[in-house]
C-alpha cells in the first residue's frame, strides 16, 4: 500500500458548480462567484468529475496531486458558500481603533499600544472585511485569500519589544472558516 503508484485522482463536482478546464487552467464558477487557478498537471472533465493525471505516480507526484485535490475542493466549496474568518480586537492598555480604508485595500489600526503611527494590513482581492464593535469579519470565496488577509491583520498587531505576559493587546483570530479556535 505504501509504494502504490497513484496515476490519477478524481474530484466530484457538486451541483450548482460549473467547471471549465483550459489546458492547465481550472475555472470554477457558482452562485457566490468565480475562481480560477493554474495547476501544472493534466486535468480533464468527464461527466460530473475532474480527473487529475500524473506521469509516474511516485511519492512526490502523489503529494502534489493530494494538494491539488485539496485546492480544487476548496474552490468548489468556496463558489457555493463564503469562507468566513472572525478576529477579535483585544485592547488591554489603550483603546484600539480599527477601520477599513476607503478603497478597501487595507485595514488601518490606530492607537495600538498608544502608538502615534498607524499600522496597516493588506486586504487581498475579492475579500470583504467588516468591522463591528470588537469583531472583524472576513468573507471570501477564496479560502487562501481570506486566511492570508486574517493572518495579515493578526500579524500587524504583533508585539515585539515588550513582555507578552503583560502586553496582551492585539487582534486575534477566533474563528477559521467556520471552525472556532
Image (spheres, rainbow, N blue to C red):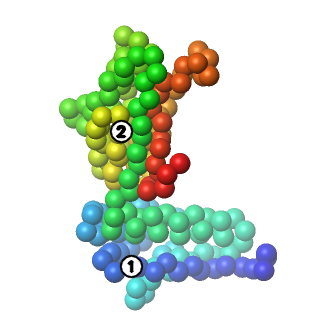
47, 22: nearer the viewer: 47
Image location of residue 54, percent across then percent down: 60, 75
> Residue under circle 2?
135
Residue at figure coordinates x 49%, y 63% from the top left: 71
116, 91: nearer the viewer: 91
Residue at figure coordinates x 30%, y 50% from the top left: 126
Residue at figure coordinates x 59%, y 80% from the top left: 8
Crowd around label 2: few <14 · some 14–19 · many ≥20 (10 Å): some
Q: Report the side of 92 relative to 98 (left or right).
A: right
Say whether disc 1 or disc 2 marks the residue closer to the N-terminus: 1
Q: Quadrant of the N terminus?
A: bottom right
Residue at figure coordinates x 25%, y 68% from the top left: 31
Evaluate if marks 1 and 2 touch, with contact meaning CB atoms under 8 Å apart: no
Task: Tell me if residue 142 can be seen.
Answer: no
135, 112: nearer the viewer: 135
> Residue under circle 1?
14
Amino acid at each position: 500500500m505504501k509504494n502504490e503508484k497513484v496515476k490519477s485522482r478524481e474530484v466530484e463536482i457538486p451541483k450548482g458548480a460549473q467547471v471549465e478546464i483550459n489546458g492547465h487552467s481550472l475555472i470554477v464558477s457558482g452562485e457566490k462567484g468565480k475562481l480560477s487557478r493554474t495547476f501544472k498537471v493534466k486535468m480533464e472533465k468527464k461527466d460530473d468529475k475532474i480527473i487529475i493525471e500524473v506521469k509516474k505516480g511516485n511519492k512526490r507526484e502523489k503529494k502534489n496531486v493530494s494538494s491539488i485535490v485539496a485546492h480544487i475542493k476548496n474552490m468548489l466549496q468556496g463558489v457555493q458558500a463564503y469562507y468566513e474568518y472572525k478576529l477579535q480586537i483585544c485592547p488591554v492598555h489603550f483603546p484600539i481603533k480599527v477601520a477599513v480604508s476607503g478603497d478597501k485595500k487595507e485595514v488601518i489600526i490606530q492607537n495600538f499600544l498608544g502608538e502615534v503611527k498607524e499600522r496597516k494590513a493588506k486586504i487581498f482581492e475579492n475579500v470583504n472585511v467588516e468591522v463591528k464593535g470588537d469583531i472583524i469579519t472576513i468573507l471570501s470565496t477564496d479560502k487562501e485569500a481570506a486566511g492570508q488577509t486574517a493572518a495579515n491583520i493578526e500579524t500587524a498587531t504583533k508585539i515585539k519589544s515588550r513582555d507578552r505576559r503583560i502586553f496582551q493587546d492585539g487582534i486575534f483570530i477566533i474563528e477559521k472558516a467556520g471552525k472556532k479556535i
